[in-house]
Image: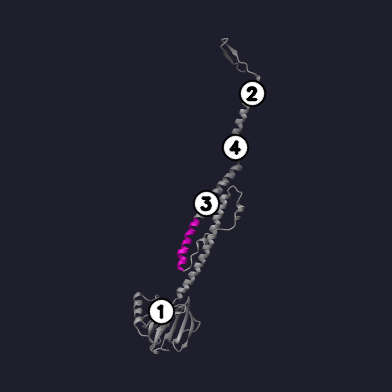
Amino acid sequence: MAKVKYYYDEDTLSYRKISVKKSDYYRKILFSFLGVILIAFIGFIGFSQIIKSPTERAQERELENLKFHYDLIDRRVAETSEILNQLQERDNNIYRSYFEANPIPEEQRKAGFGGVNRYKSLEGFDNSGLIKQLTKEVDILSKQMVVQSKSLDEIVTLAKEKKVMLASIPAILPIKKGDFYVASGYKMRMHPILKINKFHKGMDFTAPKGTPVYASGDGVVSLAQRSSTFGKVIFIEHGFGYKTVYAHLSKMAVRKRKKVKRGDLIGYVGNTGLSVAPHLHYEVHKNGRAVNPINFYYGNLSLGEFATLQKSSEESQSYD
């Protein structure tokens, strides 16, 4: 039963019953009903934001997982790029410098990719910016790795050639230590037979006839014959611009086109050709010009032995 409400009338000094109109009553009910609906709607919206469907939760988990893997790949790309930068620096400043190769220009290493629409297919997604940036980084890194790989292949080839070159350079004495003394060096002198001042293009090693003579570096015998000046003489082409001459031999142990290694026996000391005594006349040529052989004996001489040999070559007399 509804409660009856009263109010105090000051004019009559008595309580009067409050009469409620039906229209006010229905209006109140309507407002209450609308309020309940509004509160229910707001609650539903908030609840739907908190309580999500299984599909929505799965999509969010997948998105978080993708972001996690993106960050992981991005870190790995950065680490790989740093390692590659260190390798590029060593390649230019150490490897290529050692083998006398020109460094690879920075613009060639860091060159990007042409085409404004190269990554157009990656646009239109929620995370297109991240995907495009990562794809660009991977593409640039891949290109740099290709450039570096080709450079290392070149370094390997240069290293192999360097090994061959080091073995080919005439770096040892053509006669064993203790079996000779130096009669003449690389200098102007009076020819003992022609009696004219003539530049002596090699070194004369006096030794008993029949003393073994050895190839001073790897190479191929380009000439093994007798001449009026050099007598029995052997020429060896070592490659890389080097050639050696072994003259006045008593006997030759190799023939033309024979491949020889450093230290191989090629002949014996003699007194053939324009010679006044048994000795070996030895020359070293570089790019078609005779050079001082004494600068090439680092393969089997100590500093003291080298100094003694150099002094002897400057003071002695030519035998041819």
Task: Answer whether residue 182 is magenta in the image.
Answer: no
Choose between 52 and 293: the one closer to the eye: 293
**Within 10 Å of the Cα at label 2, are there few (<14), some (14-19), or many (20+) other Cα atoms?**
few
Work out how far the residue at label 2 is from the one at label 3, CA to CA, in angstroms: 63 Å
Q: What amino acid type is highlighted by mark number 4? A: Ser
* Secondary structure category for the residue under label 2: helix
The residue sitting at 55% across, 53% down in the picture is 134
Q: Dividing the picture into quarters, in which one does residue 60 lie?
A: top right
Above/below status of 106 relative to 212: above
Cα distance between the residues tagged 4 and 1: 94 Å
Q: Amino acid at mark 3?
A: Leu
Residue 279 sits in quarter? bottom left
Q: Earlier in the sequence, mark 4 or mark 3?
A: 4
Gap in angstroms between the C-alphas marked 1 and 2 = 123 Å
User: What is the span of residues highlighted in magenta in the rendered image?
Assistant: 79-99
Q: Secondary structure at mark 3?
A: helix
The 10 Å Cα crowd at callout 1, few under 14, some 14 to 19, many 20 or more, is many
Q: In the current view of this chain or complex, which residue is farthest to the front?
A: 197
Residue 56, horizontal then vertical, whole percent: 60, 42
Count of labels shown?
4
Mark toward the start of the polypeptide (3 vs 1): 3
Q: Amino acid at mark 2?
A: Arg
Disc 1 is placed on an element classified as helix
| Residue occupied by mark 2 | 27
- Mark linked to residue 48: 4
Q: Which residue is mark 1?
A: 293
In terms of sequence position, does the residue under pointer 2 or pointer 4 come before the other? 2
Residue behind mark 3:
72
Circle on res. 81: none
